[in-house]
Amino acid sequence: MNKNSAQLTPVDDALEYLLSQVSTTQLVEYVPLHSATGRVLAEDQISQIDVPPWPNSAMDGYAVRFSDLQGQQPLPVSQRIPAGAMGGALAPNTAARIFTGAPVPFGADTVIMQEQCAVNGGVVRLPSSSDGVEKGQNIRAKAEDVRCGQRILSSGTRLRAQELGLLASLGVDQVPVYQKLKIAVLSTGDELIEPGTVAGSGQIYNSNRYTLSALIDSLDMECIPMGIVADSHEATETALCQAASKADLIISSGGVSVGEEDHVKAVIEQRGFLHLWKLAIKPGKPFAYGEFDATPVLGLPGNPSAVLVTFLMLARPYLLKMQSVRSFQNTPAVVEADFDLQKKSIRRRYLHGQLKHPTLQSGLNLTEHELALPRVQIYPNQNSGMLSGASWGDGLAIVEVNQTICIGDRVLFYTFSDLLG
């Protein structure tokens, strides 16, 4: 990639290059199912059982032979089958009282919900086929959900609540997952102090450390805070050496621009390799990618909003692929602009936006409602040093290079709810 000229690398080209350079983790460990939320599967999961293991009732009601319903005669209740019990074979011209989840007795082929039945003295009156009863209704078939030998989850899947529940339903109590990546985070700048101390003249609080640590935690990776690094070549080199010895990847904020006090870029070039620098992105132009002591380094800008944007758009997919996640690309939605922007830019802009969803009105059919796209407003102040717009917003609206926007135009929108999970 061209890193030394004044030319800015397009965001899509930069991301494609970043992803082509990823070395995925291969270290595997087994963890209990209750500790696996957010972890990444290291092996395909193959079911060893059928789910359900036998036909079972989807309702509280009465299990019968469909052929016994033709005469509309009351049937004696021959047995009671609660969940967790196995009944005997159903005698002809009888009904079995059955509860949700209980195995359907041999011979029965239909379950009628209890609300449609009337019981009197051990005899139940049932509706007939002419009343809309269908053979096989309210019965979950054997292996209807999962069959033995079926691949239910693929390697590279990030485990959510639903995957953990699925695995538990198969009797799995521990799973092979890739070891968590260790991400070192360092913040550069003599002006930075930690929250909880009194800011002196010219000092600002280090918000980037907390933004980045929360973002890394949301990916279920281990964040290693390296503290604040002084604006000197020696301090920067020392911090990068320490970070490289502890982590799989280093993320820095600040120090990658062109100022005399920006040392991260210079140290990387001196001790390693700088592969990428300066992108056509706003905010976040000074983003850099390189290696220090064979450890990859993502150099984010120092401005808080630029840190958030460049992490979500560039660092996040890189880290997910590095963690061996199978699906790691960001996917935007299409929305309508509720703002006007006539000034063009040579950089792709990511604007903090808030969605307004259409309300289903009386008389509006579903098709018309589905065609009504959400509308996005943008925060009045899009300054890269400000985080208030990100807190106010639902996500990031995209304005392409040299694009202007009029109210009603369609734009792409990345929701924070998708990007932060």
Image (cartoon, helix red, strand yellow):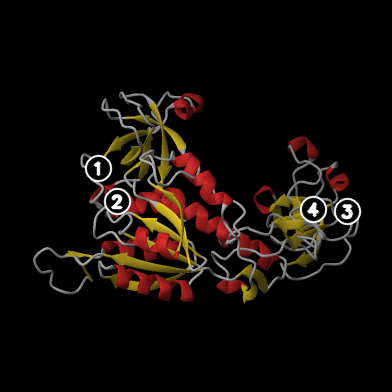
The residue that appears at 57% across and 66% down in the rendered structure is 39
Q: Amino acid at mark 3?
A: Asn
- Given residues 45 and 48, the one toward you in this image is 45
Left/right of residue 182 with respect to residue 238 in the rendered view? right
Kind of residue indicated by mark 4: Ala
Q: Is residue 297 above or below residue 349?
A: below
Q: CA distance from mark 1 to mark 2?
A: 9 Å
Mark 1–mark 3 Cα distance, whole angstroms, equals 75 Å
x then y, percent, for residue 152:
72, 57
Q: Which mark is residue 141?
A: 4
Question: In the displayed structure, does residue 319 sit left or right of residue 86?
Answer: left
Q: Give the CA separation, mark 2 to mark 4.
A: 53 Å
Relative height, residue 342 to residue 290 (above, below): above
Which label lies toward us, 4 or 1?
A: 1
Q: Which mark is residue 305?
A: 2
Q: Earlier in the sequence, mark 1 or mark 2?
A: 2
Earlier-in-chain disc, 3 versus 2: 3
Q: Are marks 2 and 4 in contact (CB under 8 Å)?
A: no
Q: Residues within 10 Å of mark 2 (few under 14, many from 20)?
A: many
Of the two numbered discs 1 and 3 in the rendering, the one whose residue sits closer to the viewer: 1
Q: Taking 213 as reference, is 91 left or right?
A: right
Q: Which residue is mark 3?
A: 93
User: Residue 92 location, x and y as percent?
Assistant: 91, 55
- Mark 1 and mark 2 residues within 8 Å of each other at the beta carbon: yes
Who comes first in sequence, dot 2 or dot 4?
4
Reading the image, the residue beneath label 1 is 382
x then y, percent, for residue 375: 35, 32
Disc 2, SS: helix
Q: Distance from label 4 to label 3 (Cα)?
A: 23 Å
